[in-house]
Image (spheres, rainbow, N blue to C red):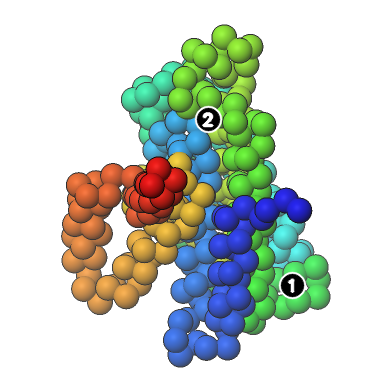
Amino acid sequence: MQRIPSSIRILALLLVPALLVPFFPQIVYPVFVMKVLCFALFALAFNLLTGFTGLVSFGHAAFFGWAGYAAGEMMILFGARGLPPEIAMACGVAMAAAIGYAIGWLAIRRTGIYFAMITLALSQVAYFMAVQVGWTRGEDGMQGIPRGKFLGLVDLSVDTNMYYFALAVFVLGFLFVYRVIHSPFGQVLKTIRDNAPRAISLGYDTDRCKLLAFVLSASVAGLAGSLKALVLQLVALNDVSLATSTEVLLMTLLGGIGTVWGPVVGATLVVSLQNYLATLGDVVTIVIGLIFVLCVSFFRRGFVGEWLAYAQWRKTKENNS
């Protein structure tokens, strides 16, 4: 019998308490957990591109925010007429994939800091468009987005139903990213990350592979943005801002870039700090900054990365003894 991978076993174990969250709102608020799930999925998308392909992007907020705008607008226009939220989310993912293809096509011909700067510049164009285009509501943002009914049957305006829907979307997104990482295509991406000239010598079209990885990453980020629009019933300019792009980078680095569970841990930590220290105002930014400095100084692989390195060291030591 084939052994179940450890990452999948961890997911199965975490699903047990996750399924019980709506029954204990006095311990943890379901809407807070849904927000964590949205940003964890966003961080997984970013890690797919940066951690496993080696391309550092400062423009992922464009996919996250514009997908939210697309899904939100679809629900505002057609939600009252019975449009299922999954269709609106599909429109959001399509929007993110289209933007991702456009940005990726322009950016993948460069590497390193030049790639990062191109994604940064184009994401600022996406932000400017969000300010200028009328249907995004500019600085007011989209508010009161209806959640609709899943499959036309399950009313997502009920927080418990919305919670289980968000949990299901996260699990599917996680499994999708996991499958991509561990597929033959994922191995090619790791080869490109570690040694691009070798990948070229083996006959791989590295530009095509990087573009596909960019579009896949943008699509998953769009799924996260669409889900967040339904969960919080709000899409704001902050969702397409540079701050959101750097925030997801911070989440990934804190958790452990290039690891499966690192982005989830990092997103949980950052969103938790923002939520529970919100009463401190701008001090939250200082606290997160200090944690980041400590992480870079003492946990350069991120929390999950350091744990995996320690576990590997213990295993090697036991084998040699």
In this figure, what is the number of numbered marks?
2
Residue 150 in sight in this render: yes
**Closer-to-camera residue (163/79):** 163
- Asked if residue 42 is positioned above or below residue 79 in the image, the reply reads above
Answer with left or right where residue 257 lies relative to residue 69. Answer: left
Mark 2 and mark 1: Cα distance apart in space? 40 Å
Q: In the image, what residue occupies the spot 44% across and 86% down?
A: 27
Answer with left or right where residue 81 lies relative to residue 141. Answer: right
Label drawn at residue 298: none
Q: Residue furthest front?
A: 321
Q: In the image, what residue occupies the spot 57% across and 75% down?
A: 18
Q: Secondary structure at mark 1?
A: strand
Answer with left or right where residue 2 lies relative to residue 20. Answer: right
The residue under label 2 is 190
Name which of mark 2 and mark 1 comes first in the sequence.
Answer: 1
Residue 68 in sight in this render: no
Q: Secondary structure at mark 2?
A: helix
Circle 1 packing at 10 Å, graded few (<14), some (14-19), many (20+), is many
Quarter of the figure with residue 291:
bottom left
Instruction: Give the percent coordinates (x, y) of residue 217.
Output: 56, 40
Answer with left or right where residue 250 lies relative to residue 282. Answer: right
- Asked if residue 208 is positioned above or below residue 120 in the image, the reply reads above
Q: Are marks 2 and 1 in contact (CB under 8 Å)?
A: no
Instruction: Give the percent coordinates (x, y) of residue 273.
Output: 31, 68
The residue under label 1 is 149
